[in-house]
Image (tube, helix red, strand yellow):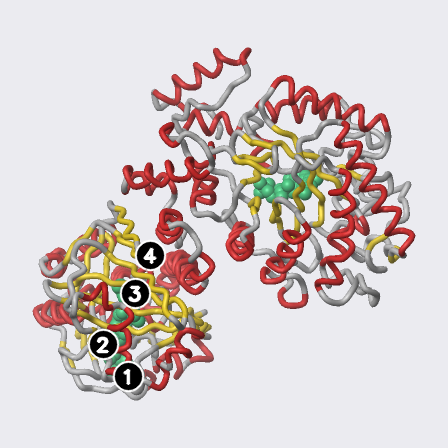
């Protein structure tokens, strides 16, 4: 095959090498606009595992590259005058220039023609004279632009500013992050050694800080001198150096996140940064480029046609690229939002930084550096007022809200059972909640319990509006208190416009087949085309419902619940006031967020006044409507939480969605946790996270990183009432209390977990 590689970066050169290794007869030319030893930037990083793939493809170039690696195992974080170091991370660095020179040598040795100082004006024209053109022309790919209508690139220019500098100061003992507070805001550096006497020193900050420093109008020299002053105490008198002479002006950049919808067109295929970028904070761009080169070379030798190879290449690489891009996005956004975390204690800040891409889990950190993680866990326990020597996971730390002390951080999330009779809980509820309280969670939250008959969602929903309800709930609460050390929370709500609907396992949210009752909401809206239009509440309705909430809270207090939660989420009555999608009111309860919050806050204040002062109240919110700017978004959720906090709400239970049939949720593991993270770290309010959290590892990492104070699990507790006790057994934790009659079962489980046979237990 006659092959042109457009671009002599890692992708182009490594593709040429990989093709020659598979068939020496290929006629391959690499076209590169620069000279052989011109390059931007400084060093690149590989992780240990990346390099195994590269070694398998070409042991010769791998050995040459490895011979020039600078290795380090530790990550050091300078923050608030402390240096936190954790180990076991296994990275290596090499000068980009050295890497390219070694790849050039290897390519030459294999018979690849290298044409330097050759600018290619059009990949389309080049393609006429070659069987295949690999467009590895980098981040600002001209080829991508030339055929933009085919490749359909999405380019997202990110908000932070960064500049890639170098220094002869040594950072040879650890990959180092330095966070400095300046008169113009926070600014930070990512520093790593890549050869005997040079280190990369990437400086990054927010646009606001960058503006205040006036970096935009500085020459590269001036940028270096200013950054030297900022980071003087880490540079040991060494200069910062720029080698970006090819970039005009200041050399500061905004990172462009690139992803092309199509990667090939005719006989042209995009590779490396031209097709998709990662982010420098996870150091995977070169890895991605080189691995794509190997994949393409393989496919060109195993697929029957060029087009078949292109199709497979895109299929195979896209998944890997999306996986990396998702990690890169998490990492990039962490740095974009870093000011949110700059109040954290250095231990927690470091943990948050290390787990930012969500690729490193809590137990994975233990494998990397047991001692560091145990130190962090001890810090967490101490902060929670527990004995730090017990070496327990964060999920087993106690938590205090007013006088209520929870034994651990796991919450059974409220879940409607649809088994009530005329609002009255039955033996089903006694057994159901009793089992969950026995199962080890620190807090069991009962289902949305409605303040009136018309406020029920379905005829099977529980209520708190009759003496019989109060008595039935008291029986359940008494059982929980007598037989377990779990606490029990009563979730009070009113269904609003989503009321008078079928049971959860029937046609959910659809009107009843018969016996519908009239519903009311903030405004005269209907949940969907199938549902009845709600009556807009007038002041008399509002007074009545407020009084119903108060009466229900008084019953809950007499039933001896430990905590109350007011349901202001999921499109029910109070949620219908908060979201602009359903609140169309023109009075003082509609319009601005402050107005839309007025009625839910009125309810809270009235309830708070009758609820025992020593007992806490939480409010559950939908932190996003998942409909974009026309609904609630996470920044509104921060404002909502501030208002709740000011009113005296003790903790915000951060759920999301279910407020609109048009919602487009983005599902995934722990998908709602970022809302809790944002609220907790921007307002300082305690939060509960919920949503697709199912592994003990998820719970521990959320808590340890300070993304929530409590973690709610709903469906996992339907699958396993003993989720917490099973998790403890699996993790080797022996500190959780089992019900006495179950001790023989506990001992069996401990033995099985100890002998590695714990697979019989579903956790
Ligand atoms: C600040 C920063 C730090 C980074 N740190 C790391 C890291 O630590 N680890 C890591 O793995 N990656 C890192 N990267 C990313 C990495 O540099 C790229 O992902 C990688 O170089 C991509 O390789 P490539 O071959 O696709 O593109 P490039 O390396 O950009 O190569 C493209 C080549 O094409 C040439 N070219 C372009 N257009 C033409 C034309 N019309 N005619 C002729 N030649 C042309 C260019 O001169 C260039 O040499 C970093 C990137 C940045 C911005
Ligand atoms: C069967 C079922 C019933 C639910 N009922 C309620 C409820 O009464 N009140 C409430 O706030 N959330 C309710 N939810 C939502 C859960 O509390 C939780 O927020 C959601 O299921 C996401 O958590 P998960 O991924 O752990 O299941 C219910 C969820 C399920 C699965």
657 up-or-down from 744: above or below: below
Pointer 3 with pointer 2, Cβ within 8 A: no
Residue in the picture at 42% in, 35% down: 381
Dot 1 or dot 4, earlier in sequence = 4
Apparent side of residue 538 relative to residue 592 in the rendered image (left or right): right
Residue 580 lies, in percent from the top left, at 73, 63
Classify mark 2 as within 8 Å of ligand 1 or not, answering yes or no. yes
Question: In the rendered image, is residue 300 in sight?
Answer: no
Disc 3 marks which residue? 189
Question: In the rendered image, is residue 743 in sight?
Answer: yes
Dot 4 or dot 2, earlier in sequence = 2
Residue in the picture at 30% in, 80% down: 251
Disc 1 marks which residue? 247
Give the total of numbered labels.
4
Pointer 4 with pointer 2, Cβ within 8 A: no
* Distance from Cα at disc 2 to Cα at disc 1: 9 Å
Q: Residue 670, which numbered label?
A: none
Apparent side of residue 683 relative to residue 117 in the rendered image (left or right): right
Residue in the picture at 73% in, 66% down: 592
Pointer 2 with pointer 1, Cβ within 8 A: yes
Disc 2 marks which residue? 40
Task: Label 4, secondary structure: give it.
Answer: strand
Pointer 1 with pointer 4, Cβ within 8 A: no
* Distance from Cα at disc 1 to Cα at disc 4: 31 Å
Badge 4: residue crowd in 10 Å (few <14, some 14–19, many ≥20): many
């Amino acid at each position: 095959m006659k092959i042109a590689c457009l671009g002599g970066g890692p992708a182009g050169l490594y593709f040429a090498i990989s093709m020659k290794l598979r068939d020496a007869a290929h006629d391959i030319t690499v076209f590169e606009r620069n000279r052989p030893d011109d390059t931007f930037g400084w060093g690149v990083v590989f992780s240990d595992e990346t390099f195994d793939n590269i070694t398998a493809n070409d042991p010769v170039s791998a050995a040459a590259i490895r011979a020039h690696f600078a290795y380090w195992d530790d990550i050091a974080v300078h923050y608030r005058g402390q240096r936190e170091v954790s180990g076991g991370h296994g990275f290596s660095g090499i000068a980009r220039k050295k890497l390219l020179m070694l790849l050039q040598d290897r390519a030459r040795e294999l018979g690849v023609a290298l044409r330097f100082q050759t600018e290619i004006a059009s990949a389309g024209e080049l393609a006429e004279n070659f069987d295949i053109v690999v467009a590895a022309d980098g981040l600002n790919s001209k080829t991508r632009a030339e055929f933009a209508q085919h490749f359909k690139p999405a380019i997202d220019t990110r908000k932070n500013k960064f500049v890639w500098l170098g220094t002869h100061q040594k950072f040879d003992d650890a990959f180092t992050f330095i966070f400095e507070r300046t008169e113009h805001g926070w600014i930070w550096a990512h520093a790593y050694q890549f050869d005997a006497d040079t280190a990369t020193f990437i400086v990054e900050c927010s646009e606001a800080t960058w503006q205040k420093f006036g970096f935009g109008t500085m020459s590269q020299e001036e940028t270096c001198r200013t950054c030297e002053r900022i980071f003087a105490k880490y540079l040991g008198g060494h200069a910062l150096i720029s080698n970006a002479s090819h970039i005009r002006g200041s050399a500061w950049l905004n990172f462009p996140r690139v992803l092309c919808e199509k990667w090939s067109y005719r006989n042209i295929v995009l590779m490396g940064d031209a097709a998709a970028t990662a982010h420098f904070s996870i150091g995977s761009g070169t890895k991605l480029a080189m691995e794509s080169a190997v994949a393409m070379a393989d496919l060109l030798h195993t697929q029957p046609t060029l087009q078949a190879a292109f199709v497979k290449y895109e299929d195979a690489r896209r998944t890997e690229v999306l996986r990396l891009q998702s990690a890169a996005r998490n990492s990039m956004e962490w740095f974009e939002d870093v000011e949110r975390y700059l109040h954290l204690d250095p231990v927690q800040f470091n943990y948050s930084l290390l787990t930012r891409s969500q690729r490193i889990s809590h137990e994975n950190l233990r494998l990397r550096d047991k001692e560091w993680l145990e130190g962090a866990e001890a810090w967490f326990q101490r902060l929670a007022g527990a004995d730090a020597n017990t070496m327990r996971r964060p999920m087993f730390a106690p938590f205090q809200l007013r006088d209520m002390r929870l034994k651990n951080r796991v919450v059974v999330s409220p879940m409607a059972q649809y088994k009530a009779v005329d609002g009255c809980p039955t033996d089903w509820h006694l057994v159901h909640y009793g089992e969950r309280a026995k199962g080890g969670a620190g807090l069991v939250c009962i289902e949305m319990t409605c303040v009136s008959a018309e406020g029920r969602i379905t005829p099977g929903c529980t209520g708190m509006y009759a003496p019989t309800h109060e008595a039935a709930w008291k029986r359940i609460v008494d059982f929980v208190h007598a037989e377990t050390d779990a606490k029990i929370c009563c979730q009070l709500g009113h269904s609003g416009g989503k009321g008078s609907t079928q049971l959860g396992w029937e046609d959910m949210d659809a009107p009843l087949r018969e016996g519908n009752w009239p519903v009311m909401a903030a405004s005269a809206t209907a949940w969907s085309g199938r549902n009845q239009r709600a009556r807009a509440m007038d002041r008399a309705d509002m007074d009545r419902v407020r009084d119903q909430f108060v009466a229900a809270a008084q019953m809950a207090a007499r039933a001896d619940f430990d905590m109350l939660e007011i349901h202001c989420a999921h499109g029910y009555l109070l949620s219908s006031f908060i979201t602009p999608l359903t609140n169309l009111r023109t009075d003082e309860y509609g319009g601005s967020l402050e107005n839309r919050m007025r009625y839910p806050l009125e309810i809270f204040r009235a309830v708070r006044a009758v609820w025992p002062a020593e007992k806490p109240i939480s409010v559950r919110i939908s932190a996003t409507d998942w409909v974009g700017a026309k609904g609630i978004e996470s920044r509104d959720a921060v404002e909502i939480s501030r208002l709740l906090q000011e009113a005296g709400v003790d903790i915000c239970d951060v759920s999301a969605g279910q407020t609109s049939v048009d919602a487009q949720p983005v599902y995934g593991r722990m998908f709602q946790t970022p809302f809790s993270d944002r609220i907790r770290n921007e307002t300082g309010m305690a939060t509960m996270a919920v949503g697709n959290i199912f592994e003990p590892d998820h719970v521990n990492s959320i808590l340890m990183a300070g993304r929530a104070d409590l973690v709610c699990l709903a469906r996992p507790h339907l699958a396993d009432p003993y989720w917490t006790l099973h998790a403890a057994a699996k993790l080797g934790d022996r500190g959780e209390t089992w019900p006495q009659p179950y001790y023989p079962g506990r001992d069996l489980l401990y033995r099985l977990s100890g002998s590695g046979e714990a697979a019989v237990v579903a956790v």
